[in-house]
Image: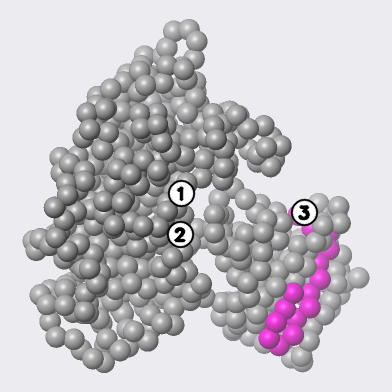
Amino acid sequence: MSQTDVSAVLRSSDSAETVGIPSSAILALLRRMERRGLNAHSLLIARHGAIAFEAYWHPYSPETPHRLYSASKSLVSLAIGTLVDDGRLSLEDRIIDHFPDKLPSGDLDPYLTAMRVVDLLTMRTAHGSTTFKQVADTDWVRTFFTVPPNRQPGMVFSYDTSGSVVLTALVERLSGKPLTEYLTDRVLTRIGVQDPWFSLVSPTGMDLAERGGQPTWREVESNPEGTSHGGSGVFCTPRDLLRVAQLCLAQGRWGSDQVISAEFLRAATDYQVSTALTSPAFPDGRCGYGYQFWRNRGGGYSMRGMGGQIALCLPEEDVVIVTTGDNQGVGGADQAFFDAVAEELVPALGAPRAVDPDSAAELARYARSLALAPVPVTGSRAGGRFRAEYELDPGPTAFVGLELDVSPDFGVLRLHTADGQQREFRFGLGSLVRHGLPGYGYETHSSGAWLDENTLHVHSHVLGRYLAQIDLMVTAGGEAVTLVMNRAAEAFAEEYEGTVSGRRR
């Protein structure tokens, strides 16, 4: 295995070929991702400590912080590792000993008392699922101790985000700082991170009005009493995530600085527990789990977050690959990405080689063209402008009225609620238009296309704190109309789901 020159980590390479990656292989990887329908926001590749490729899908850029979702868990693991290195924590500590104020009254369940820090790191807790989604309690940490356990800890893997939140709370108790502030001071500045990191937090102590009517398991942007959402809520740039992954690949060393002990990093990224029967049924989901890191085929490991947040480390090839995106509505997206890397990129790796000018130029052109995809134009409607208003049937959805105003290049779709509210989607025909997500205000980019003479498809990319994909399909024939709405989003925009019919006003 070629060893990374850690004295010059993550310098920019003159070309991908300088570190033995053909430009044609990166181009093949990008094209395969596109063919598979992956909705990527970034792709970064480093080898031998040098960035070989970096690209972003407009409007994303190197400066855009991206939500990591469950890839945040791996960062919590690194924070725990630094506390172990500093002698402030043992992985064999009982977790209840660190949270006496969160324990239920009376005799404690023996499964609860037996849980160790390492059991939370390896997802072998006494709970079969996330506890703060099982009860109405804003104190997510407390729920971990008050929800009755249902299994012997330390035995089998079961994905439990509440365990990651408790680990985050442990970091914050021992350090006296929010998670991202502690990581910045202890790790991130030492590896060259300059952009600020931040995290969403739990709604601990907030009443319904303060939560904006959201359920107790929904994270919030600000709350002095909250615990950082280390299970799903950390934001950073993809370039900074690449730095963290490179630190892991180098077993905690950055230049001459041993930031985190190699002993902890080896254990964290190695196989600790089987995921063969208790994780998603795809090949790279069943390779095992470490300390909040997933194992991969071929001896690799990764940080993984919902929707396509991946930092993949391949020690044998001395390669780190980071991608971010929003594939919540794309089945098998993570495995599709791992397969593309294994089949398009890895076989092409080798020694430094001469640049193929044609391949390099083609890759550069392709990378410059990357952008969030508009709806493909597959049909058309005769004539120029289409305008219509419809009254929708009561009951099936939140909406009672629909308006369409579509020109050859631009359109507006308005939905009306019974209480007089209006939800407006503005879109380009075959191009993206930026607007706020109706009802929420989140940055949204929408496009539309006629699929045939009577059917209009509007697709929206929702960006920012909460990622989503929303599809609206309007089929109008004569006086009748039917609206079909689908949304791929975590716990919001539920009103954009369902089918409703109506008639022209």
Q: Nearer the viewer, residue 468 or 46?
A: 46
Q: Which residue is mark 1?
A: 198
Residue 131 shows in the view: yes
Residue 485 magenta-drawn?
Answer: no
> In terms of sequence position, does the residue under pointer 1 or pointer 3 come before the other?
1
Residue 402 painted magenta: yes
Q: Quadrant of the C terminus?
A: bottom right
The magenta segment: 397-412
Q: Which residue is mark 2?
A: 65
Give, as a three-letter code, the residue at label 3.
Ala
Q: Position of residue 11 (x, y in %)?
A: 22, 68
Mark 2: which secondary structure? loop
* Residue that mark 3 sits on: 398
* 411 relative position to 60: left or right: right
What percent of the width, then of the height, locates residue 100?
42, 16
Front in this rendered view, residue 185 or 485: 185
Q: Is residue 310 visible?
A: no
